[in-house]
């Protein structure tokens, strides 16, 4: 009898400490995806750190047709990125799909700011899945611009999701800063 009581006490103690840890934000029962598009690697670096501190799965949104340097020339209004970004209905194709999107509760979506907003390929991503009931948090890198209307645009494309405004980070943002920021949703 005494042994049984000791075992029960041990189980209760471990359950309580598990709960405390969960409340402290060290653990989460939420399944996290960090999906990102990065044309020149800057956003990829931030996405890596974010996946590490959130314990999330990392998914790269790879364009079916990669962007060449000429494609990215924002000074040329005929370049591929300029043409795509001038058209809100442009939907560049993505090379692969997230496996079993339904398993995720929280989806961080990263991208470079292009022309003050999310690149068109992010619009393709938003329309490619059912985000019903999911929390979506955009994050970005840029020369200096903020998020602009990125979150608003993305919310319109996934009306059943809860899309937050999100945040732009410098390329060298620390893991600590990312963790403090991300904890709000975990
Ligand atoms: C086509 C294009 C448009 C851009 N537009 C902006 C902009 O409006 N504001 C800004 O601050 N930076 C702008 N940038 C700079 C990128 O946002 C910045 O270099 C970003 O960190 C690149 O991320 P990546 O390496 O993940 O692609 C633009 C870059 C490109 C290629």
Image (tube, rainbow, N blue to C red):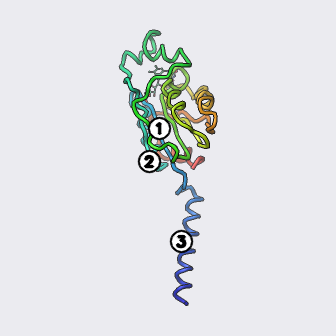
The numbered disc on residue 172 is none
Q: Would you name the residue on which mark 2 appears?
A: 52
Q: Residue at coordinates 59% horizontally, 47% vertically from top-left?
A: 185
Q: Mark 3 points at which residue?
A: 14
* Closer to us: 6 or 142: 6
x then y, percent, for residue 100: 47, 44
Q: In this view, does 181 lie above or below 28?
A: above
Q: In the image, is 41 to the left or to the right of 14?
A: left
Query: Mark 1 against mark 2, which lies toward the viewer?
Result: 1
Mark 2 crowd level (few <14, some 14–19, many ≥20, 10 Å Cα): some
Kind of element beneath mark 1 = strand
- Single out the mark in the foreground, 1 or 3: 1
Q: In this view, does 137 lie to the left or right of 45?
A: right
- Mark 1 Cα-neighbour bin, 10 Å: few <14, some 14–19, many ≥20: many
Residue labelled 1 has its Cβ within 8 Å of some atom of ligand 1:
no
| Disc 1 target residue | 35
Q: Residue at x 56, y 85 (%)?
A: 5
Which mark is first along the chain, 2 or 3? 3
Identify the residue at image location x=46%, y=50%: 55
* Up/down of 44 relative to 66, above or below: below
Task: Indicate the quadrant containing the N terminus: top left, top right, bottom left or bottom right.
Answer: bottom right
Residue at 60% in and 26% down: 148
Residue 101: x %, y % from top left? 50, 42
In terms of sequence position, does the residue under pointer 1 or pointer 2 come before the other?
A: 1
Q: What element carries label 2?
A: helix
Distance from disc 3 to disc 2, alpha carbons, whole Å, reads 26 Å
Some atom of ligand 1 lies within 8 Å of the CB belonging to the residue at label 3: no
In the picture, measured across the screen, residue 139 lies left or right of residue 38, that is right
Marks 1 and 3, the one that precedes in the sequence: 3
Say few, some or many: other residues with alpha carbon within 10 Å of mark 3 (under 14 / 14 to 19 / 20 or more): few
Disc 3 on helix, strand or loop?
helix
Tell me the distance, in whole angstroms, between the alpha carbons under discs 1 and 3: 34 Å
């Amino acid at each position: 009898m005494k042994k049984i009581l000791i075992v029960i006490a041990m189980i209760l103690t471990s359950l309580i400490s598990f709960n405390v840890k969960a409340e402290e934000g060290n653990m989460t029962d939420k399944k996290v995806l960090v999906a990102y598009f990065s044309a020149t690697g800057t956003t990829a670096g931030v996405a890596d750190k974010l996946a590490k501190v959130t314990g999330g799965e990392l998914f790269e949104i790879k364009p079916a047709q990669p962007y060449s340097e000429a494609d990215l020339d924002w000074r040329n209004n005929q370049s591929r990125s300029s043409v795509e970004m001038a058209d809100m209905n442009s939907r560049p194709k993505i090379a692969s799909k997230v496996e079993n999107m339904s398993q995720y509760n929280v989806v961080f979506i990263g991208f470079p700011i292009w022309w003050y907003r999310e690149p068109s390929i992010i619009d393709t991503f938003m329309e490619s899945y059912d985000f019903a009931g999911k929390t979506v948090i955009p994050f970005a890198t840029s020369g200096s611009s903020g998020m602009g209307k990125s979150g608003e645009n993305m919310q319109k494309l996934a009306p059943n999701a809860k899309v937050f405004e999100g945040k732009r980070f410098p390329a060298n943002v620390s893991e600590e800063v990312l963790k403090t920021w991300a904890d709000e949703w975990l």
